[in-house]
Image (cartoon, grey):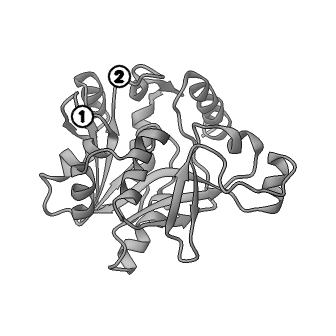
């Protein structure tokens, strides 16, 4: 079975109560859940909540919810807590709770490498950066990958560094630079192994937990998508999401 798990942490440091933030009359976690249900390759979607307030709201809109301990530090650890009790799940998809407009097709694009290639154990998404604002924003991780689409490195800094470029805009003109979209697909065994490992040096430095995988020899397949998503990390992001919703969905 392919199981999508949405980790929902109430006590976000940059946006308290983020899963319950209102977007167009619905809590953000409901938007994420309903968007995930549009995947054609997921058999079930579960919300992993760390707070009973979030859990009850999710139950009210019909989601299956598993309440996880508050002391769990990361989203990956939260989904691993759920996955360890689901031996029937072959593939686990970590769908970020702060991606209210994630598209079902994006989830399916990320799953496909594991479906068609038994040697792939972890995959994620990347999209070409088109604006200087995205390139210089440290909240948007960047990724470089090899000719077989396996990740070489993730960073909050613009990578690769384009030595001959006269500006960041010039960098985008002469090189393909990609942002990382934080949707992860794991074979269950790979997820449980990854989350059993201690944090690593580069992970601590960059504050990017996917570097723990690379430092321990995991190969991460990168799927380049043409589709866009929108991550909500700050109050400013929330206002952008509300405007996006009003523009794209309100008339429906």
Q: Give the residue at x 53% y 53%.
A: 154
- Neighbour tally class for label 2: few under 14, some 14-19, many 20 plus, Cα within 10 Å: some
User: Circle 2 sits on which residue?
Assistant: 11
Q: Give the residue at x 76% y 62%.
A: 175
Separation of residues labelled 2 and 1 (CA atoms): 12 Å
Query: Is any atom of residue 88 visible in this view?
Result: yes
Tell me the element at label 1.
loop
- Looking at the rendered image, the quarter that the C terminus falls into is top right
Residue 111 position by quadrant: bottom left
Residue 65 as seen in the image, left or right of residue 113: left
Tell me the element at label 2.
loop
Residue 201 as seen in the image, left or right of residue 87: right
Q: Position of residue 204 (x, y in %)?
A: 41, 39
- Which label lies toward us, 2 or 1? 1
Q: Position of residue 73 (x, y in %)?
A: 29, 34
Tag 1 or tag 2, which sits nearer the N-term? Answer: 2
Q: Nearer the viewer, residue 144 or 30?
A: 144
The circle on residue 72 is: 1
Q: Nearer the viewer, residue 228 or 233?
A: 233
127 is higher (above) or lower (below) than 68: below
Q: Nearer the viewer, residue 91 or 100?
A: 91
Do residues under tags 2 and 1 come within 8 Å of each other at their CB atoms? no
Q: Position of residue 14 (x, y in %)?
A: 48, 22
Q: Give the residue at x 60% y 37%.
A: 138
The residue positioned farthest toward the right in the image shown: 166
- Neighbour tally class for label 1: few under 14, some 14-19, many 20 plus, Cα within 10 Å: some
Q: Position of residue 139 (x, y in %)?
A: 57, 37
Residue 251 as seen in the image, left or right of residue 89: right
């Amino acid at each position: 079975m392919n199981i999508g798990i949405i980790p929902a942490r109430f006590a976000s440091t940059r946006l308290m109560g983020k899963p319950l933030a209102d977007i167009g009359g619905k809590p953000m976690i409901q938007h994420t859940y309903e968007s995930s249900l549009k995947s054609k390759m997921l058999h079930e979607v579960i919300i992993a909540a760390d707070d009973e307030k979030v859990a009850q709201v999710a139950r009210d809109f019909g989601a299956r919810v598993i309440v996880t301990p508050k002391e769990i530090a990361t989203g990956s650890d939260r989904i691993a807590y759920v996955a360890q009790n689901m031996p029937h799940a072959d593939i686990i998809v970590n769908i970020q709770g702060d991606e209210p407009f994630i598209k079902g097709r994006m989830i399916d694009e990320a799953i496909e490498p594991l479906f068609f290639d038994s040697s792939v154990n972890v995959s994620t998404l990347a999209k070409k950066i088109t604006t200087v604002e995205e390139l210089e924003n440290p909240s948007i991780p960047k990724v470089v990958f090899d000719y077989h689409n396996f990740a070489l490195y993730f960073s909050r800094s613009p990578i690769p560094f384009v030595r001959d470029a006269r500006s960041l805009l010039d960098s985008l003109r002469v090189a393909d630079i990609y942002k990382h979209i934080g949707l992860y697909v794991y074979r269950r065994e790979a997820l449980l192994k990854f989350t059993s490992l201690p944090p690593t040096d580069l992970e601590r430095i960059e504050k990017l937990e996917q570097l723990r995988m690379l430092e321990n020899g995991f190969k991460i397949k990168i799927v380049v998508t043409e589709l866009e998503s929108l991550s909500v990390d700050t109050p400013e992001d929330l206002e952008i999401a509300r405007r996006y919703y009003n523009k794209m969905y309100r008339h429906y």
